Image (cartoon, rainbow, N blue to C red):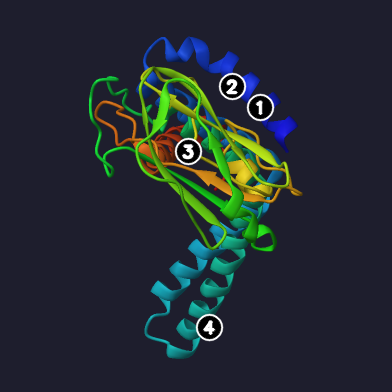
Amino acid sequence: MNTINHAVSAVFDALLYPLELLGRPAALILVSAVFGVLALLLFKRISWQKGIRAAKDKIWAGMIEIRIYQDDLRVASKAIVKVLARNFVYLGLNFLPFVPLSVPFAFVVAQCVVRYGFAPVEVRATTEHVSPGSGTLLSIELESAHGELARGLAIEYPPGVEPISPLVRAHGRAFQEVVARAPGAHAIAITLPNGARETKFLVAGTPERRMQGERGKGFLDALLWPAEDALDASSPFARIAFTYPDSRLGWFPGGAGGVLLVFLVASMLAGALAIKPLKVQI
């Protein structure tokens, strides 16, 4: 999955570069709109368009039948049952094609989130005293089978990042609050007594094209967080995470939820406007 993410990220880097010259909000809107139209075209190809049209016609015919025979309880009741049954058929014909469409949707949304959802952490001057609670909390979780290794867990900070609280280790987890003293993409290394080692990037000051606040394990984590490699299945680490500030996208909401909302609205609006020109039954 990591190899696929590398390839997809490289493609998006190239495709989004000219759009990002217009600004991040414009790039997000445009890529969402393009996806909406392309998804509509793909829906047209993989769905049974004649069946959808026929189901809609039968539903409309049933509604007319109910209207005409509204005073005949027996006929009207049968027409209502038929309309309900045809609605289920219609919904099934529309829903099934969306199952394969969910795969490209997940890839594109994940790319948008790691590019437009987050802002880098603030850089604090080396002379500035930062009290605990005002920094960035680094959280490390181990697999339950390796929880005892947390007692020997160590964190190596690069120049530009320093801890401002003690390292707390408990129940297979470790926590420490840090602060960035210099801009850049800083690689924080976490090691265990058995020699296992993982890194997590902390971006400060100047945003990178792709940023994510956590590294997890498994297919879903790899799909949702493509900016850094997912943890190997054999790794004793289960999750390494911290929280980036939400991005600022002008009039649009920031953060992962804001990016998802903007993407859904823009792609659905573009798709709705393209239904008639593309002659798609939906």
Which of the 4 image quarters holds residue 265? top left
| Residue 82 vs residue 24, the one in the foreground | 24
Q: Position of residue 12 (x, y in %)?
A: 59, 21
Q: Could you tell me if the residues under marks 1 and 4 are in contact, i.e. CB atoms within 8 Å? A: no
Residue type at mark 1: give it. Val
Q: Is residue 244 found left or right of 132 in the rendered image?
A: right
Location of mark 3 (residue)? 213
Q: Residue at x 42, y 79 (%)?
A: 69
Q: Could you tell me if the residues under marks 1 and 2 are in contact, i.e. CB atoms within 8 Å? A: yes
**What is the distance, in whole Å, between disc 2 and disc 3 at their CAs?**
20 Å
Q: Is residue 14 found left or right of 265 in the rendered image?
A: right
Location of mark 2 (residue)? 12
Location of mark 1 (residue)? 8
Q: Residue at x 56, y 53 (%)?
A: 141
Residue type at mark 2: give it. Phe
> Between disc 2 and disc 3, whose residue precedes?
2
Please tell me whether mark 3 or mark 1 is closer to you in this view: 3
| Residue 76 vs residue 239, the one in the foreground | 239
**What is the distance, in whole Å, between disc 1 and disc 4 at their CAs?**
52 Å
Residue type at mark 3: give it. Gly
Q: Secondary structure at mark 1?
A: helix
Q: Position of residue 238 (x, y in %)?
A: 62, 51
**What is the distance, in whole Å, between disc 3 and disc 4 at their CAs?**
56 Å
**What is the distance, in whole Å, between disc 1 and disc 2 at their CAs?**
6 Å
Location of mark 4 (residue)? 78
The quarter of the image holding the N terminus is: top right
> Between disc 2 and disc 4, whose residue precedes?
2
| Residue 256 vs residue 160, the one in the foreground | 160
